[in-house]
Image: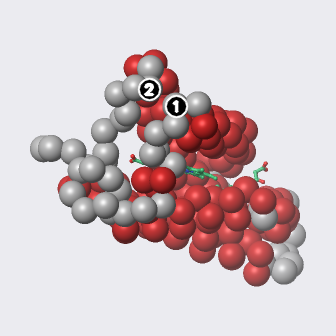
């Protein structure tokens, strides 16, 4: 299958919506930690709204992630830039795959911890945060490097849709 010239509008909207929801999850999770601790220690659950929001936002990421990967499979993605060194293109691709892993892995481990009370899932969810944040940082540094060092349209193509 030939690769498209750029991302579609839907691919772009999904990228930024998922990114935003993940930032929300990473910055507001204290009510969920508290509720989970209360549940584990058999205490009555207080102020569950924040925890419910964490569940809803997290499961939304999972559903949008499924839509995104389906579209990616059907439509494809634009090719990497030829002028960027192959090792950096490889690193960018590996980081993208890792981020997709988290788009699915975080909601799944969270759900296994919350709904089924599996302690290992909670541990994996916490470790996930420790890897996800540097992975996002690397991804952003990569996007800025493409923009300001290699001066190509990597960043623009995640804002401006193009037909196949
Ligand atoms: C994109 C999706 C998600 C992200 C990025 C995310 C992120 C986080 C973060 C950063 C924490 C704090 C971890 C820590 O203790 O340091 C947390 C805690 C937690 N999250 Fe999520 N979460 C997501 C989805 C979900 C979902 C869908 C559920 C449940 C259905 C869930 C259940 C939990 C639970 C139970 C905790 C407490 C774990 C503990 O304190 O050991 N998460 N989450
Ligand atoms: C400020 C934050 C972010 C910036 C500036 C950014 C920028 C970009 C850019 C420019 C691309 C296109 C790269 C290319 O095709 O040349 C991209 C792709 C991608 N981004 Fe982000 N991103 C951000 C946050 C995130 C977050 C939080 C996630 C998920 C956790 C994420 C996941 C991905 C994935 C998986 C791709 C690959 C898309 C594909 O080709 O299938 N990004 N990002």
Kindly identify which residue carries mark 1.
Answer: 150
Evaluate if marks 1 and 2 touch, with contact meaning CB atoms under 8 Å apart: yes
Q: Quadrant of the C terminus?
A: bottom left
Crowd rating for badge 1 (residues with CA inside 10 Å; few <14, some 14–19, many 20+): some
Using the numbered discs, state the Cα–Cα distance from disc 1 to disc 2 in whole angstroms: 7 Å
Q: Residue at x 77, y 75 (%)?
A: 50
Instruction: Identify the image quadrant of residue 27.
Output: bottom right
Secondary structure under the numbered disc 2 in the rendered image:
loop
Q: Residue at x 31, y 48 (%)?
A: 77
Crowd rating for badge 2 (residues with CA inside 10 Å; few <14, some 14–19, many 20+): some
Q: Is residue 114 left or right of residue 26?
A: left
Residue 153: x and y in percent read 45, 45
Q: Residue at x 68, y 40 (%)?
A: 137
**Rendered position, 91 above or below 22:** above
Answer yes or no: disc 1 within 8 Å of ligand 2: no
Q: Is residue 23 left or right of residue 104?
A: right
The mark found on residue 84 in the picture is 2
Residue 145: x and y in percent read 59, 34
Q: Quadrant of the N terminus?
A: top left
Q: Looking at the image, which residue sits at the far front?
A: 151
161 vs 37, nearest the viewer:
161
137 vs 99, nearest the viewer:
137
**Rendered position, 47 above or below 118:** below
Secondary structure under the numbered disc 1 in the rendered image:
loop
Q: Is residue 60 visible?
A: yes
Q: Residue at x 68, y 75 (%)?
A: 53
**Rendered position, 121 above or below 117:** above
Q: Is residue 135 visible?
A: no
Residue 136: x and y in percent read 63, 43
Instruction: Identify the image quadrant of residue 117.
Output: bottom right
């Amino acid at each position: 299958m030939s690769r498209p010239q750029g991302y579609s509008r839907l691919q772009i909207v999904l990228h930024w919506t998922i990114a935003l929801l993940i930032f929300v999850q990473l910055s507001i999770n204290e009510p969920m930690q508290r509720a989970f601790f209360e549940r584990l220690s058999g205490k009555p659950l207080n102020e569950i709204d924040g925890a419910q929001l964490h569940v809803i936002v997290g499961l939304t990421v999972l559903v949008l992630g499924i839509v995104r990967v389906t579209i990616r499979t059907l439509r494809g993605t634009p090719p990497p830039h030829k002028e960027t060194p192959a090792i950096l293109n490889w690193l960018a691709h590996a980081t993208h795959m890792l981020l997709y892993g988290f788009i699915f892995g975080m909601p799944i481990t969270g759900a296994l911890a919350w709904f089924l009370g599996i302690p290992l899932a909670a541990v994996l969810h916490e470790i996930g945060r420790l890897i996800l944040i540097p992975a996002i940082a690397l991804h952003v540094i990569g996007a800025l490097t493409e923009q300001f060092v290699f001066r190509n349209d990597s960043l623009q193509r995640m804002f401006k849709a193009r037909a196949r």
